[in-house]
Amino acid sequence: MIFLLKLVPFLLISPAFSKYTPDWNSLDNRPLPSWYDYSKFGIFCHWGVYSVPAYRSEWMWWYWKGSKPDAEVVNFIDKNYKPGTTYADFAKDFTAEYFNPQEFVQTVNSSGARYFVFTSKHHEGFTMWPSRTSWNWNSQDIGPKRDIVGELKTAFKATNIHFGLYFSQFEWFNPLFLDDGKYNTTFYPEQVSYPQMIEIVTKYRPDVVWSDGEWDKSDDYWRAKDFLAWLYNSSPVKDQVVVNDRWGAGTMGKHGGFMTYSDHYDPGTLLNRKWENCMTLDKYSWGNRRAMRAADVHTAFEVIEQLARSISCNGNLLLNIGPDMHGRIPSIFEDRLIEIGEFVNSHSEAIFETKPWIHQNDSSGANIWYTSRYRSGIKTDINPSHNHVYNAQLYQETIIYAWILDTKIDQTVLKSVTATDKTKVAIIGTDIVLTGFEKGTSLIVDKQKIDWQKVVRRDVIILKIEYAATEVRNPLEYLDKKQRIEENTYFL
Ligand SMILES: *[C@@H]1O[C@H](CO)[C@@H](O)[C@H](O)[C@H]1NC(C)=O
Ligand SMILES: *[C@@H]1O[C@H](CO)[C@@H](O)[C@H](O)[C@H]1NC(C)=O
Ligand SMILES: *[C@@H]1O[C@H](CO)[C@@H](O)[C@H](O)[C@H]1NC(C)=O
């Protein structure tokens, strides 16, 4: 017995038993922990020193002092700040005196989102935790004088929301990084970025590591594959962590966990690999902007539409907000999150733990998108050959959710759904149930049959459709052939 107890921990830590090796073949084979797909909707948050000038966007420093300065930004600073002002001067004014992590968490939670991703460090290099390798350029030494990442991590622990961290690989003006570019050395990743990645994972145990700022250098330079092998094999979050695809020049859309492809990615067709649409609530910036106007902010309807378009195509939606230098989430964002949350919470069965269906949008071309689930639960994979990217359409088993995003028309014709005499349609969030459809034809829902007093929103309703006719269709076959081959290589 004693012998066994001693042996077991040894076996567990022995490198010979490492599951993943630091190469993409091995790393790309790791199954994505299922919580991520089930969660569908997350909130992204960009907060750093850039929220002090809060001018143009979080890229302000680069527009001001980068290789091609933007005249408008330069003039704005010249006109409004003391001569000789440096970007580092902004850090003193990063007071965050209204930052209340509990209130912050409550606002994020009001959106109904199931995960949260926070900028631990953006391209400016300012770490929102007391990093050992960012002395005097972090939120504990200057500005808030607080461990922002740590306080958020603690506050999110009280909820069911998964906590994740964004991390910028490069820093625009870090002298070590600039020298590496000049002399072909690797001092910056060795002394700054790699140790920081290990630091945030061991200290804050994020469920998401969202890498960015990778594009200028190779995955070898960032030591990305070493990091991921460690993350998956032996880090404290090895079982639940998910990562994106930004790990070095050319990795985006190819390697990693879920694919981001680009910012604001919205393909409108089903993709074989799990992907994420990261979008901003402020149409023009990820970071806080003092000049933001109401019309610059996406409406709740627009966000709900993006959610439908994303999850019906095997994506998640990650919606960004940018707090101000005082630590306040702008009231207009708060208002949007509450409005989105009212919809998400009352329609959760059509969102969370669903799968794409055999059609993504309706074949009529109307603005109608589909999600689905099996009556017997998500684990029943009736047709394992499709890796469970989507659910098949089976009369008995499949529940279809039709997101009707155009409610103005008198008659909604669901050309992709064939009715049977048992077909039953409920309007989610109400007690309205419609039956008596004509067998063998497209499902038709008359606007007059809906009691509009009862619906949660008038501009979008979700129909829960049961006992529609069986249909055999593989939506992945309709992908562009080249893309299909490329994506299939990761599944074989
Ligand atoms: C989060 O939101 C849900 C749904 O509205 C609510 O039941 C829960 O109490 C909230 N939790 C926190 C910590 O605010
Ligand atoms: C840079 O260094 C790497 C690794 O030491 C080497 O393989 C590569 O050829 C070097 N590139 C240049 C341009 O010197
Ligand atoms: C589905 O949506 C895509 C993307 O918006 C669009 O290009 C396509 O025409 C739509 N398909 C149908 C059948 O309407």
Image (cartoon, rainbow, N blue to C red):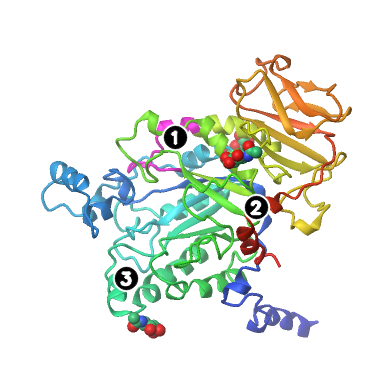
Which of disc 2 and disc 1 is earlier in sequence?
A: 1
Which residue is depicted at the point 46% across and 56% down? 166
Residue 333, disc: 1
Secondary structure at numbered mark 1:
helix
Which residue is depicted at the point 49% across and 32% down? 336
Residue kind at label 1, given as amino acid type = Phe
Which of discs 3 and 1 lies nearer the camera? The answer is 3
Query: Which one is nearer the viewer's eye here, 141 or 396?
Result: 396
Q: Which residue is mark 3?
A: 177
Q: What is the number of callouts on the image?
A: 3
Whole-angstrom CA distance, mark 3 to mark 1, is: 35 Å
Q: Quadrant of ligand 3?
A: top right
Residue kind at label 3, given as amino acid type = Phe
Which of discs 1 and 2 lies nearer the camera? The answer is 2
Q: Which residue is mark 2?
A: 479
In reply to whether residue 333 is colored magenta, the answer given is yes
- Mark 3 surroundings within 10 Å by alpha-carbon count, few (fewer than 14), some (14 through 19), many (20 or more): some
Q: Position of residue 408 (x, y in %)?
A: 60, 20
Which of disc 2 and disc 3 is earlier in sequence?
A: 3
Q: Is residue 276 left or right of residue 81?
A: right
Q: Is residue 272 left or right of residue 98?
A: right
Mark 1 and ligand 1: say if the CB distance to the nearest ligand atom is below 8 Å. Answer: no
The answer to whether residue 21 is visible is yes
Query: Which one is nearer the viewer's eye here, 14 or 2?
Result: 14
Bounds of the magenta segment:
320-336
Q: Position of residue 127 (x, y in %)?
A: 37, 59
Secondary structure at numbered mark 2:
loop
Q: Position of residue 106 (x, y in %)?
A: 52, 38
Residue 32, disc: none
